[in-house]
Image (tube, grey):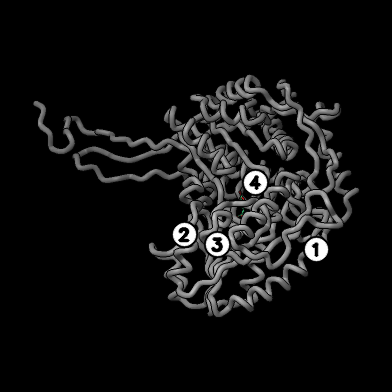
Amino acid sequence: MGNITKIDETQNLLAKFWQRSELTAGKEFPALSDGLRFFPGTSEEVVVSSSPADGTALGKIRLASVADYSAMVETARSAFDFWKNVPAPRRGEIVRQIGDAFRKHKVELGALVSLEMGKIYQEGLGEVQEIIDVCDFAVGLSRQLYGLTMTSERPEHRLYEQWHPLGVVGIISAFNFPVAVWSWNAMIAAVCGNVSIWKPSEKTPLCAVACMNIVHEVFAANDLPAGIMTLAAGNAEVGKAMAADERVGLVSATGSTRMGRSVAQAVAARFGKSLLELGGNNAVILTPSANLDLALQAVTFAAVGTCGQRCTTTRRLIVHRSLIEEVERRLVDIYSQISKRIGHPLNPDTLVGPLIDSAAVEQMQAALRSVVEEGGQILFGGQKHESLGGNYVVPAIVRASNDMPTVQKETFAPILYLMPYDTLDEAIAYNNAVPQGLSSAVFTNDLRESERFLSASGSDCGIANVNIGTSGAEIGGAFGGEKETGGGRESGSDAWKAYMRRQTVTVNYGSTLTLAQGVKFE
Ligand code: UN1
């Protein structure tokens, strides 16, 4: 697997990659796929996907209409009748082959993620690796999917529970992880016996088409029916239709808290299930016993990686008062080094790529203006990058306090708010005093401090790390968070249970009827 060093080389790889789909011979990419075939969308809306790196048009897509989406759900439903009866380990074997197909295309897909989303190539590769990892995990899971067996209070009775698939799983994904988050859902859903329909972000539709190209190889080679994994690249109306659609058993949505709230309400109104992974406002607590070199390296990656556009990005740094001056000085120094490494995401020297679009640049500027009005002080960066122009910004460090309204909000940009604390209890209180509850971390070499942070009186987040930044979670753990983050858990651990329905079974293998709770009915 070679390293990509030249953009031309990448474009050649991409050209090869697209050859498969006949529709791409024309000018438009297909918005729909049933896993075996690609179809053009039929809505009025055509989006041009252009690289946030330099504005180059990568391709255009006529989006799927709500009717297109609806037809795809019907294809998925008919595939479910077949797929749910395939033994789970056999479903796992298909996912194993899908993982291998992603291994084969890691370089091209990593480059496309980098081009279309703007994250650096290393992170593009990392994202494809998350797909491969989750496929491996799902393969193992396909021989598990355990239910519990309980003892029955009645003689000659057996009591146990088993898990069945839900049916159609709807996946709404965001631009910042244009391929990995789909795979967390689609692969786990698939080994559980579900079929899925994917509505990707309108900002990254080509990544979705590319993934469908890859799964296509496996579905076709195994003579599988259409509809096991499907794509409907539409606008927000398609997302709304999915949320309200009784044919969709689970809607798994990643994105803003505002979007998640409307999805959750529509899904709840029809008693469907939802799995939400929404905003984060993640903090790192830096204590006096911390290894400062390790901590600052970790904080920098977590704060500026993906140009601050991960839901796990470190947005707040809560520093012991005795360290605050040293930390400010050293971080400003690190950030001035980093700011020399801002540039095209496919350039191997780049550490920070662009923001997704000009609206994101404007939101960053607006957040900085308001935090300054609220009393914050910019210590470094924050401006648009002078020579690169476009969507490039210089990551910012801001001295602020936790209760400032702007600090309470998630701004999807590289702004790190620094604030001092005196006692660990105070630091933990700051960590928790935001509406979001995704990720958190403490840097300490004091066992009492780390255990306190991890205790029931500690971090209230879904992810709590010690001596590791807030981002870059492995797929083996359950991923998600509390409060406005939405409460869902995806990818590892027992997150698979969200994709299945639990059935409690009681079997009477005797020949007398015994009622539970000792009830007599004679
Ligand atoms: C996201 O930003 O939506 O933990 C997902 C991480 C990645 C996933 C982030 N593995 O940063």
Which residue is labeled 2 in the image?
A: 432
- Mark 1: which amino acid? Arg
Label 3 environment density (alpha carbons within 10 Å; few <14, some 14–19, many ≥20): many
Say left or right for 160 vs 296: left
Q: Secondary structure at mark 1?
A: helix
Q: Secondary structure at mark 4?
A: helix
Q: Say which residue label 1 marks.
A: 341
Mark 4 sits on what residue?
Answer: 180
Ligand 1: does it lie within 8 Å of the C-beta at label 1?
Answer: no
Residue 191 shows in this picture:
no
Q: N-terminal of the two: label 3 or label 2?
A: 3
Q: Pointer 1: residues within 10 angstroms few (<14), some, or many (20+)?
A: some
The alpha-carbon separation of the residues under discs 1 and 4 comes to: 26 Å
- Residue picked out by circle 3: 283
Q: How many angstroms separate mark 1 from mark 2 (CA)? A: 33 Å
**Spatial CA span between label 1 and label 3:** 25 Å
